[in-house]
Image (tube, grey):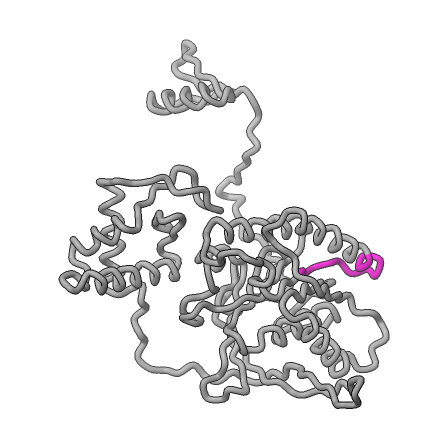
Amino acid sequence: CNAPATSKYMLRQMNKIGATSGRLRMSEPFGGPRLAFSRTSRFTSIAFEDIKAPTQPWRVKHALPMTGVAFIVGASGTRKTFFSLDGLLKLAAGTQTVWGRKSKQCGVIYVAAEDPAGCRARVDAWRRDKAGHRTSPVPFELVPQAPNLLDGEDLGDLTAHVCQIASRYEDMGIPLGVLAFDTLSACLPGADENSSVEMSRAMSALQALSEELGILIVIVAHFGKQGAERGIRGWSGLGANADGVIGLELDPADPLATNVTFNKVKNGPAGGRLAFCLTEVDLGVDDDGDPMTSCVVKFHDAPPVQEGRRKKAPSDSPGAKIILRALEQLLEVGPTFVVPPYPGVPANTSGVDRKKLRVHAELIGHPSSGLKPDTVKRMINKDISSLIADNKLREQDGIIWRINR
């Protein structure tokens, strides 16, 4: 097909592309410059009048989507595994609501990478407490080994095993819907969780697995040292690329209770809250005749959010605003760098070196200017980190760039 070119600039650019790729050719017939395509494009478009909001498919409404990668995150001791198992076992058992939200039954596979023995006891307690006299099978299976998500052969073995389980679920008339990993760090032995290279590989592998199997991947993970305010431990791209993040924190007024917040719900309302405590369940006796117990989750109303003066977000502080201004100035005058390959980021996106950004921010009036060099460095790095945590900046391999939202 032929389409009129709009400018000589377009002709020059498309000729450059054609010279390197062989996909396009430019010609100038009598009617003026024309762009002739030598193949059919894989891209499609939707006319303005036909653009309508699609129906969002949910596994748990406004909490877990049908596909993608979602995180259940909390510090150690916040009962992440109890909460995760309770919700996913209810999904497998066909409970109409999970976490007080409408749900759709599916088969579940739970990879107990960190504490398989503890997970077995918790599933046993849930079955005794929740399943009652249920006679129909529950499509839930527990994998008591830890895979290495960065090892292609290991991931291939896991995928083959998952497909075998999925086939059994299909014979029951219930599709596989969720594959859970508990915890992320246990599935990345020896990996640097702060490394954008290693963690982006792991995230890409999980996203590919979700797409290939048409299921949701649920990851149980830890908060960083700064707690919930800084998000998932390690690489900032985990939270940025997640399709859902559920955060768990101990109730400061009652350490026996855990507060749950739906921090991120892609294409849905975030901010919903729950609370739960644990109730002990008798599991019989061990080989020595001593009693065995575990616990199950019991939900109750979450405590009200404390009203009061709203604290200014760290990413809105005067220092953070100076960082953003310094970034814009460096992008105009340089030097700039092409951002390394990153999921969802257009090619040829420009960024700046972190050190040069820090120096320029001090130069144009960061609040720390004039203090001791170590203090200046620490305060500017803190502001940069707050902007990254708030998804206003992103960093990879020492290059920082702005996120357009």
- Where residue 19 sits in the image (x, y, percent)? 44, 18
Task: Let me know if residue 67 appears in the view.
Answer: yes
The residue drawn where x is 58% and y is 82% is: 276
Residue lying farthest to the top in this orientation: 30
The residue drawn where x is 64% and y is 81% is: 297
Q: What stretch is highlighted in magenta?
A: 168-179
Question: Depth check: 212 or 12 in front?
Answer: 212
- Where residue 302 sits in the image (x, y, percent)? 52, 83
Q: Quadrant of residue 217?
A: bottom right
* Relative vertical location of residue 82 with respect to residue 164 in this rendering, above or below: below
In this rendering, would 289 be left or right of 89? Answer: right
Q: How many labels does the image show?
A: 0
Task: Let me know if residue 90 appears in the view.
Answer: no
- Where residue 289 sits in the image (x, y, percent)? 79, 90
Q: Does the magenta stretch include residue 177?
A: yes
* Relative vertical location of residue 102 with respect to residue 267 in this rendering, above or below: below
- Where residue 105 sits in the image (x, y, percent)? 72, 65
In this rendering, would 321 be left or right of 40? Answer: left
Residue lying farthest to the left in this orientation: 370
Q: Quadrant of residue 362?
A: bottom left
Question: Depth check: 6 or 298 in front?
Answer: 298
The residue drawn where x is 33% and y is 82% is: 308
Question: Depth check: 38 or 207 in front?
Answer: 207
Q: Is residue 35 magenta?
A: no
In this rendering, would 103 be left or right of 398? Answer: right
